[in-house]
Image (spheres, rainbow, N blue to C red):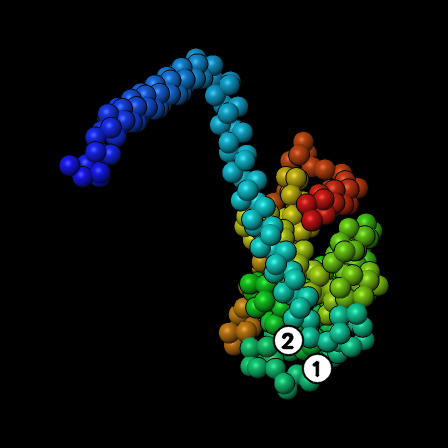
Amino acid sequence: MSDASASARPMAPLERMARVVVADVGQGLVAVSHNALALLGLLVVVLGLYLVDHKELRHQAERTALGWLQDRHGDQLLAEAAAEDDALVADAGADPGDPLANPLAADPATLNRQQAAVASWLSRRYKVAQEPIARLVHEAWAVGKAAGLDPTLILSIMAIESSFNPFAQSAVGAQGLMQVMTRVHNDKYQPFGGVLTAFDPVTNLRVGVQVLKECITRAGSLEAGLRYYVGAANLENDNGYAGKVLAEQAHLRRVAAGQKVPVNAVSAPRPAPVPASAAAPAASAPTAEVGQQLALAVVR
């Protein structure tokens, strides 16, 4: 008998014992896992029955879950909007810290057919020189493409907000072509050189597009976004603002398509009268505008 055979015999009982121990431990773990899953399932069933009998708790749980999902979706949308804002600043072209580096006029002959038609119509409609209008039309096309917005929408907001007066200011402090609340959105002007650039037409256009994009993203639709933009999101009536902007945009789209549109075409039908119970005093509109834009500023 060899030494190897002699040494193998005493190991057989140990091997069998080890296998028995491993098998017992494995079966025990399986049993514990099954019991734990059964207990978890029982708890879920009990909790479900409890919530069925307590509608308020069930509704609260549903609202909490829905709110969590909406917050995550909103954060994602705002992050995407912030990335687009960075892209707008990066695409500024000239030195953003020097507003005078941005040309304030352009030769209308350098525009394409659509842009030239729009610039000519706006120049005659609002009685402003074609060269600065041509610069703004060219910028609206470039920035609109970067922001995913129709350039005719951007130009329509400038038309309704300021009639293309770059030095316009409202009673509540909205300034420039797109009537941006400078003190609320001062951070957006910093990459361009500070709040005084609010009166630079090109800079005001770029910042206004950032604000508009955020309003549309937060509201979920174009018309609701326009109500946010004008500060009427929490009001029953925006005094026809969204309708005027969209009607002006419809005119510009027709002009860009080569159709003839009278320069005195009506911007929008007269808004429907508001019931006396729902009408707000005229002085309340600025407060709503400030409050809405401040609310947006908190998010940003």
**Where does the image place residue 294, in percent across and percent down from the top left?**
74, 45
Residue at the left extreme of this rendering:
1
Disc 2 target residue: 138
Q: Is residue 292 above or below residue 27?
A: below
Q: Residue at x 51, y 18 (%)?
A: 56
Q: Residue at x 63, y 53 (%)?
A: 214
What label sits on residue 226 in the rendered view?
A: none
Q: CA distance from mark 2 to mark 1?
A: 8 Å
In the picture, residue 87 is in which quadrant?
Answer: bottom right
Q: Secondary structure at mark 2?
A: helix
In the picture, residue 42 is in which quadrant?
Answer: top left
Q: Residues within 10 Å of mark 1 (few under 14, many from 20)?
A: some
The residue closer to the viewer here, 191 or 157, is: 191
**Where does the image place residue 19, in percent across and percent down from the top left?**
26, 27
Q: Is residue 124 left or right of residue 219?
A: right
Disc 1 target residue: 106
Q: Is residue 146 above or below residue 9?
A: below
Dot 2 amino acid type: His
Dot 1 amino acid type: Ala
The residue closer to the viewer here, 14 or 255, is: 14
Residues at marks 2 and 1 touching, judged by CB atoms closer than 8 Å = yes
Q: Is residue 123 left or right of residue 115?
A: right
Q: Is residue 101 visible?
A: yes
In the picture, residue 114 is in which quadrant?
Answer: bottom right
Q: Residues within 10 Å of mark 2 (few under 14, many from 20)?
A: many
Q: Is residue 139 left or right of residue 53?
A: right
Q: Secondary structure at mark 1?
A: loop
Q: Is residue 292 visible?
A: no
**Where does the image place residue 120, in percent across and percent down from the top left?**
64, 78
Q: Residue at x 74, y 67 (%)?
A: 203
**Where does the image place residue 83, in percent across and percent down from the top left?**
61, 59
